Amino acid sequence: MADANDRVSEIAAAAGPAVTDSKVPEPEVPGPEVSDLKVTAPGAVEPTTADFRHLADAIPQLAWIADGHGSIFWYNRRWYDYTGTTLADMRGRSWSKVHHPDHVLQVVERYNTAFAAGETWEDTFPLRRHDGVFRWFLSRAEPVRDAEGTVVRWFGTNTDITESRDAEAAVRRSEERFRTLISASADLIWTAGPDGGMIPPLPTWRAYTGQTEADYAGWGWFDSVHPEDRERVMDLWRDCLASRAPLHAEFRLRRRDGAWRYSDVRAAPVLGPDGSVREWVGVSSDISERREAEDAIFEAKELAESANRAKSQFIANMSHELRTPLSAVIGYSEMLAEEIEDVGQTHLLTDVGKIESSARHLLGLINDVLDLSKIEAGRMTVESVDFDVAAMVDEVVGATGGLIGKKDNRFVLDLGEGLGRMQSDELKIRQCLMNLIGNAAKFTEAGTITLRVRRPEPDRLAFDVADTGIGMTADQLGRLFQRFSQADESTTRQFGGTGLGLAITRAFAKRLGGDVVVESAPGRGSVFHLVLAAAVRSDDGGATAHPVTIKPEPEEAAAEGGGEAPRRILVVDDDPAARDLLARFLKREGFSVTGAADGQAGLTLARALRPQAILLDVEMPRMDGWSVLHALRQDPVLVDTPIVMVSVKNEQSLAYALGATDYLMKPVDWERLKRVLDRLQPQRDGTILVIDDDEGARERMRFTLTRAGWTVVEAGDGQQALERLDGVTPCLILLDLMMPVMDGFDFLERLRQRADGGLVPVVVLTAKDVTPEERACLDRQAERIITKGSLSLPDLAQELRDLIPAPAR
């Protein structure tokens, strides 16, 4: 640093005589004569030396002048403002004070070299600002020569380049980070030009693919794409280049070892200030392991679904195989009981009753296991029907009376006001209540069991089952609803049971829009709170039950059996009083009635219910009777349905022209209406066709039905049944589903295609676990679906009497 300062002193000494005041000296500007600088514009004056000094002070650079030897003797005002110095401060070598000590020596050496050679000098170095901060400057000096070529002056400037230098440094750091990221990333990060060609160097691409820079530069990278993927990738890449949209694609790249690996490739455009694409930045990730895992998961999923389908089929078949023999045991027990009673051997009824009771208990266990299997497989379905809550509760109480009385318990039924009706799965609700009451009866002795039913909200029903039994601890409550689990092992040993009832009850409750919870304490009994939605929709086994609004027509709510009876009449009239009168008359005549308040609803119900006949008003809102009549006659399913027009106007000609079967004037003549309906009813005798491959099942049906007054014709499969129909038109068909030669599904389809089989009611009596799809098909073609063993033979006979009255003898 001392050498540099000495040199600075030499430069200062050679600068000429010292200036004795602080006034900036006027430079003698050599070079062109003033006459050469004249301004030729009209009225302009010649610039003076002061003008040039003011110009020097106005420029943003720090300006200075040195003599021919490089000694600086003048600075512009910018220099003093930036450095905070005066001319006195800059005398001698003092100007070196504003140079950074780490750079001053190199600056002086390069300065001396350039000035000694008389060449343009240019350098960059930091200068200290008046506040002590160093900023970088680009310094430049040009020599001015006389006529002989001798350097007589040097004119120099210092331009502040700190911001641009910082920006360049930031760009360099960003590029270094980007290059480091490329090198360190497990993915392939690459850049491409606006045309889609890759821009080297890309070390990770080279390391992965084995291509050299010359190989992959431009469009050479395309050689690494699998031949089968190239056309697709090329089209996609070109579309992205044209639309400037980000690229996302999956295709195979060749690894340096020759293996084809799946890559997930993404790229985005980098836009310039004018919106044009400057370059593309992309990343390629090797996803071969992920693809292999996905393929393995997909294969496992397929295997699991296949296994689940096999399990479902096994459950369906097993239900048939288990229920069929149990149905036989129960059926023969009932037949023996009737025969024993007929011959007066009543002392044997107790033993036969035990056989039937044990068989029904075993059937209940089988049903529980099958229900649990359907719950676990997600195949539990909701079959919503409209029913009276109090009537359903009465049936439950009647069915559980024997359980309650076994241990000398007292039963209390507490029904609240306004229970009304529910639209839900009645069978599942009954099973839930029977499970809860049976559970209470099991753990209570000489106590009280209470069933309390309330409607706390219009859309909720609450069922509380309370007992005064042994109660449970908190630990036992935690395991209560687990499958195959009871309170503890001692409870199982003492009271028995499988531990499935409560688990099934909770699963049913959740599917029916509610839940079941319990309150209990040891020695103080338990209270189970079952809360359910008042209305849920039927589903296909995959959808959750959702609450719906119940607004049944009065005649629908009051109809016995709803729309399931074969002798159903659809009454379409916008007048509620007219519908009510017709419904009352028709019910007395043994018909089941469904009402519709307008033509559109009537058309929908006709297609859904396929009634035996339709009574149709003419003048209605939305869709009048003529439009409904026309639509019905265009429907291939309903084209032959008898339609009786009912109107205050006499328009018989139009009615018959449009295809009406008959025409009645309001007010209705009831005797005439009766004659019309009698004429429309098919002429059938009291014959029932029983179709079942189980000879024992047919024998039991024949025994029961014959005693009830029907004539029975039998068939061992669907094909035989079709042959039997050639000689007889039965009033009802009892149909099993699983049979050889032709099963029940095929028989139903063939039956409904026959001219004489369209209106024959069919009751499906099966041990098969019917799937939702099968049930939907059967609902369109059959009147009832009854699980074997779920009804006693006398109860079955009563069901059939409700459908078709027994013929008079």
Image: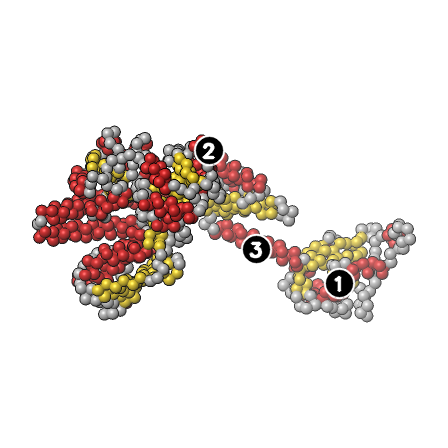
Q: Position of residue 464 (x, y in %)?
A: 30, 62
Which of the pair 542/581 is nearer the observer?
A: 581
Residue 636 appearing in the image: yes
Amino acid beneath label 2: Leu
Of residues 715 and 10, the one nearer the viewer is: 715
Question: Who comes first in sequence, dot 3 or dot 2?
Answer: 3
Give SS at disc 1. Answer: helix
Element carrying mark 2: helix
Q: Residues within 10 Å of mark 3 (few under 14, many from 20)?
A: few
- Where in the figure is residue 793, as x and y percent of width and height? 20, 46
Using the image, tell me which numbered label, if any, was put on residue 632.
Answer: none
**Residue under numbered circle 1:** 78
The quarter in which the N terminus is drawn is bottom right
The image quadrant where one finds the C terminus is: top left
Residue at the image point whose x is 35% and y is 59% from the top: 419
Q: Nearer the viewer, mark 3 or mark 2?
A: 2
Q: Specify whether 90 is left or right of 653.
A: right
Q: Which residue is mark 3?
A: 173
In the rendered view, does 168 fall on the left or right side of 705? right
In the displayed structure, 147 sits above or below 160; it is above
Q: Given contact means CB atoms under 8 Å apart, are the residues at marks 1 and 3 in contact?
A: no
Q: Nearer the viewer, residue 436 or 604?
A: 604
Q: CA distance from mark 1 to mark 3?
A: 33 Å
Residue 654's label in the rendered image is 2
- Residue 615 in the image, given as x and y percentages of width and height: 40, 40
Assign a secondary structure to mark 3.
Answer: helix
* Mark 2 / mark 1, whichever is N-terminal: 1
Left/right placement of residue 70 relative to residue 803 reads right
Q: Residues within 10 Å of mark 1 (few under 14, many from 20)?
A: some
